[in-house]
Amino acid sequence: MALSSNSSTSQDSREKITIQNVSRSYESTQALADVSFSVAEGEFCCVVGPSGCGKTTLLRAIAGLDDPDGGSILVGGDPVTGPGLDRGMVFQEYALFPWRTVRGNIRFGLDRPACDCPDCEARVRELINLVGLDGFEDAYPKELSGGMKQRVGIARALAVSPEILLLDEPFASVDAQTRDRLHVELLDIWTQTEQTVVFVTHDIDEAVTLADRVVVMDANPGTVRSTVPVEIDRPRQRTAQEFLEYVARIRDELGSPQEVNEASQ
Ligand code: ADP
């Protein structure tokens, strides 16, 4: 699934997600402190930073699953007040129903999960095809590899054609080879759907492979240190000089070697 060059950021600078001065504390921990940035419509934005810098908290707030203490999050200009069909979320640990088949799990993402009308059936088949799981429709999660489970998670999040896809370290639990393949597939899906993507990771290579723009976060408290536009045509080669320069630049932004090692593991 080769992907041609895509520079949606420069093509479309309309703001889809606007994060303004967002703060969130848990008892004595300030997870997010005055976080502000925006994501353009159709942009692939990666958020990178060390463990505990508030990446998941931020993503959950965009999804409407968590309520910040201060600031605001706008989606398409409207404040986020809770979850919505305009935002699909993919979780790190798959979050599949073990008692449902691939088809049943994906079907659950539809706005009418119990409906078996021809349109809903066709949509489920289309999603299974999109994520490359043809032939596994009736398999249960325990029969699938990590990569396949995450494909189900992605298909389920895509079921209602959300305008925004939010992914929380979705490939952290799969082997490196599978991860590479899933990167290609995710970029291919993104090209087809033209969705706005926010992808959280602690892996700098992964961020530079995928992103139009990388938001680099700091911990204690969670703040935005910088944003780095990645101006490399796709598909990107990890051994290319300019790729390595972006990785080095983000590693510098992230701080000390010890922090970077933790962030890259
Ligand atoms: P990241 O995703 O970057 O690892 P998180 O958003 O998970 O960071 O967490 C940010 C900080 O908030 C961490 O210090 C974490 O321990 C704390 N935190 C997150 N969720 C909770 C919670 N439900 N209760 C208490 N502390 C939490």
Image (cartoon, rainbow, N blue to C red):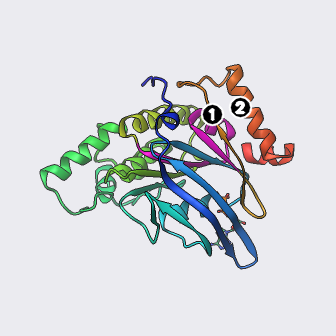
Amino acid on which the number 2 mark rests in the picture: Tyr
Q: Is residue 92 above or below residue 190?
A: below
Q: Residue at x 43, y 51 (%)?
A: 164
Residue visible at 61% across and 29% down in the picture:
231
Q: How far apart are labels 1 and 2 at the CA level?
A: 7 Å
- Front position in the image: 62 or 173: 62
Provide residue 48's location: percent of width, then percent of height: 67, 48
Q: Residues within 10 Å of mark 1 (few under 14, many from 20)?
A: some
From this view, report whether residue 250 is shown above or below residue 36: above
Identify residue type, mark 1.
Val
- For ligand 1, the image quadrant comes to bottom right
Residue 169 is at least partly visible in this image:
yes
- Which residues are the magenta region? 195-216
Q: How many marks?
A: 2
- Residue 46 placement, left or right of 242: left
Q: Label 1: which residue?
A: 230
Ligand 1 near label 2 (Cβ, under 8 Å)? no
In the rendered view of the protein, which quadrant contains the C terminus?
top right
Asked if the residues shown at circle 1 and circle 2 are in contact, with their CB atoms under 8 angstroms apart, the answer is: yes
**Residue 155: numbered disc:** none
Q: Measured from the top left, where is residue 41 in percent x and y? A: 45, 46
Q: Which residue is mark 2?
A: 246
SS at mark 1 in the image: loop
Asked if residue 23 is among those painted magenta in the image, a careful observer would answer no
Mark 1 vs 2, N-terminal side: 1
Q: Is residue 265 visible?
A: no
Residue 265 vertical placement versus 91 (above, below)? above
Q: Residue at x 78, y 43 (%)?
A: 253
Q: 55 or 75: which is nearer to us?
A: 75
Residue 42, image x, y percentages: 45, 42
